[in-house]
Amino acid sequence: MAVGRILRFDDVRGYGFIAPSAGGEDVFVHANDFGDQRHLVQPGLRVEYDVEESERGLKVTTVRILDDHSAPRSSVHANGHARAMPVGDDDGMCDVLAPDEFTTEVTEVLIKHVPSLTGAQISQIRDRLVEKARSHGWVEN
């Protein structure tokens, strides 16, 4: 079995890619390959897997999560992409922002990366993101 880390994973589309620890081509993995542990999958998660060649490239045949999944292993950057964090560099702690600090950060990202949004659209997006952030403890209540 090979070992690697989840490079990226799209919960909505139900698939992602594993970056092999030994290097080489990224490996396609489907959400169903994780069974009832699908909800634990996130960028940076260490996995052990078997792989086969398909007509579209390498794909997982079996996969098993190796990490202790109690601590987050990724951070999301302003460009919207998650970046894997090495195990051991994350103490499980993160800064918790005040809601106004969070909405300011979100507003700046939206204006910079999607300048065609209207003020009303930005406001709606910020409100939903603040709700989501509160539910995860990313902003103060």
Image: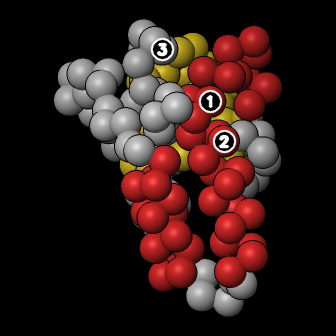
Which residue in the structure is indicated by mark 1? 135
Residue 79, how many percent across, how many down? 47, 67
Q: CA distance from mark 3 to mark 2?
A: 24 Å
> Extreme left residue here?
89
Which mark, residue 88? none
Which residue in the structure is indicated by mark 2? 131
Identified by mark 2, the residue type is Glu
Residue at 30 percent across and 25 percent down: it is 93
Can residue 108 be seen here? The reply is yes
Pick whichever of labels 3 and 1 is earlier in the sequence: 3
Can residue 1 be seen here? The reply is no
The answer to which quarter of the image holds residue 136 is top right
Considering depth in this image, is 109 or 36 the residue closer to the camera? 109
Which mark, residue 69? 3
Q: Are marks 3 and 1 in contact (CB under 8 Å)?
A: no
Considering depth in this image, is 64 or 10 the residue closer to the camera? 10
Residue at 61 percent across and 81 percent down: it is 114
Residue at 68 percent across and 22 percent down: it is 39
Identified by mark 3, the residue type is His
Is 7 placed left or right of 32 in the picture?
left
Q: Are marks 2 and 1 in contact (CB under 8 Å)?
A: yes
Residue at 66 percent across and 42 percent down: it is 131
Q: Secondary structure at mark 2?
A: helix
Residue 82, how many percent across, how many down? 47, 50
Residue 22, how many percent across, how many down? 32, 35
